[in-house]
Amino acid sequence: MKGNDFYTHEETLRDTAVKHTTKPNAERLEQRLVYQLIQDIETLEQAIAPFLTAERLAFDCETTGIDPHTDRIRLLQIAVPVQPVLVLDLFAISVDECSLLQKLLACPMLKIAHNLKFDWQFLTQAGFQLAGPFFDTQLAYQVLKAGRKGKASLGVVAKKLLGINLDKAQQQSDFSKPQLTATQLTYAAMDAQVLLALHEALTVRLKHQKLFAIARLESACVPATAQMELNGMRLHRDRWQTAVTQLHQQLHTALQTFRHCLGEAVLEQTSFLPGLQAIGGSGTNPNSPEQVKQVLGQQGIAVKSTSQSALIAQVDQHPAIPALLEYRRLAKVLSNFDASLIKHMHPVTDRLHPNYFQLGARSGRFTCRRPAIQTIPHLALTRRCFVAAPGYKIVKGDYSQIELRIVAKISGDHRMLEAYQKGEDIHRLTAAIVTRKALADITEAERRIAKKLNFGLIYGMSAVRLQLETQLEYGIVMSLQDARTFVQRFFEVYEGVRHWHERVKRNLYGNKTRRTQTLAGRLRLWSEAEQPRLTELLNYPVQGTNADIIKLALVKLHPQLGNARLIAVVHDEIVLECPEAAVEAVSQRLHRCMVQPAQKLLAPIPVVVDVQVLESWAE
């Protein structure tokens, strides 16, 4: 096929983008797919000239695989209104010669893509620089779905919003072959063309739902997320091996303690092999619910279940139960830290490159997997394994008690607001309130219990759950009666929080509400088949606002990073890898970019960000 040939496809697109929900009979536009295959620079420069004056541009990539570090772009498809789709064969065209294409991608016109993160990474690795603003149709559709279940692939979104059945059979085809088929080229061109219609359809719906600003935020955040994945994190293999060994030793000790408390023979260290299933000896297997129930029954403790909540209710009945809970805690730590990390080291970069999902949680918070960096235990032993490259430092920014500050803003609680404006330690203050002791007499253990109270009760945590979580997280054992007393005293003092809970309860049980929003306007909806729980209605506006704040900070920070590298976002933290010579300037920049957007949402409540310069991720 020659570089200046044009191709048409008989399948038509039903462009319902201009159809507003209040005008169901709006005219549908019929358009025929036309594309031009570009395989030489001369043809490219002629064809691309009209694209430079467009107001919006849709693009898509077909690649030889999904790893931007090892695979390549084969086709780059570009679509603008009233022009043929350009299908660029980047195997035939040298990227270094594509000056007009470079200019086009760097123009400040709206760039539209579906799963923009993928395309952005491959184009960046190929040497292109993309300028926004951006519009990611996948993220925009997820924002519109507002937490309701459903896939967001291009095929699904096109069918739902445009009534188009896209043929995705070629998605898994081999785009590395010297000669591509007409079917592959048509498929590629269609994926770019349909994005223009999707952008218009989504824009109408997002504005109607007052969600356009949130969709724009998500799209603006993609470059930071995409570059963070490319950067990856450096894992110190020797420290990792040391940490795994120590955790296995601690797990073995907990198992010994458990069996000793039951009067059973303990294990020699050599008989405990790495791996949670290798429990040597003939004693009780702590991973077997039946064996645990049986042996506790022999000790006079009848339990119907060996779940955490069932065991914690009996925690003061026998010393074997705390030992068993400690064993389970360590087993969970190991399950998130053992072989699952090392197997994800990239063979080219020798770094970990987690796959981040901007809307992985229904609250709008980031999630990640392969590996799940966000589940790495918040322990010095484990976090010290993540280190900076030679000549670099870790610079970490951490929002201080951001969720409690958001609760103070949402609830208008006078006592919380006063505490934050005075710069008081709210965990110590809560400890003094519930224990009825002077601030100076509060122990560290009491402060840790109060921390769990503060972060748990704002979401409606029960006394039973408080009792369980305190033991699991801090190893502190309290009676159920003490837990109930703490809960009661907490709500006696923080009346604004109590009134907020009561308002949400009335809406839930009176009006059968199925929606809630963040301070920035992010929406969470429940379908007719779903019934929201009280904890969800309390949790969403807080954690969702937290997600909004982090993403606003990333959008502000990313263009200002210079030689520093964004390497992780974990809950309330932004983690950078920074050249040693730039540490001071980058630290100030990180602090400013994190505080400013949060302060706009939470004023008059002060926002505090702790910035640390470290050798490793550990505090």
Image (tube, rainbow, N blue to C red):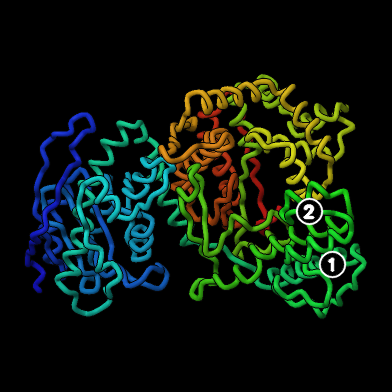
Picture residue at 15% right of the left edge, 63% below the top: 44
Circle 2 SS class: loop
Picture residue at 83% right of the left edge, 46% below the top: 476
168 to 605, vertically: above or below: below
Depth check, front residue: 262 or 111: 262
Residue 448 horizontal side relative to residue 593, left or right: right
Viewport quadrant of the N terminus: bottom left
Query: Which residue is denoted by mark 1 in the rendering?
Result: 253
Q: Amino acid type of disc 2?
A: Val
Label 1 Cα neighbours within 10 Å, binned few <14 / some 14-19 / many ≥20 = some
Q: How many marks?
A: 2
Image mark for residue 372 = none
Circle 1 SS class: helix
The percent position of residue 375, horizontal first and vertical second, equals: 62, 56
The percent position of residue 546, horizontal first and vertical second, equals: 54, 38
Residue 331 horizontal side relative to residue 101, left or right: right
> Which of the two labelled residues, at mark 1 and mark 2, occupies the earlier sequence position?
1
The percent position of residue 573, horizontal first and vertical second, equals: 59, 47
Image mark for residue 303 = 2
Depth check, front residue: 517 or 262: 262
Picture residue at 24% right of the left edge, 73% below the top: 91
345 to 24, vertically: above or below: below
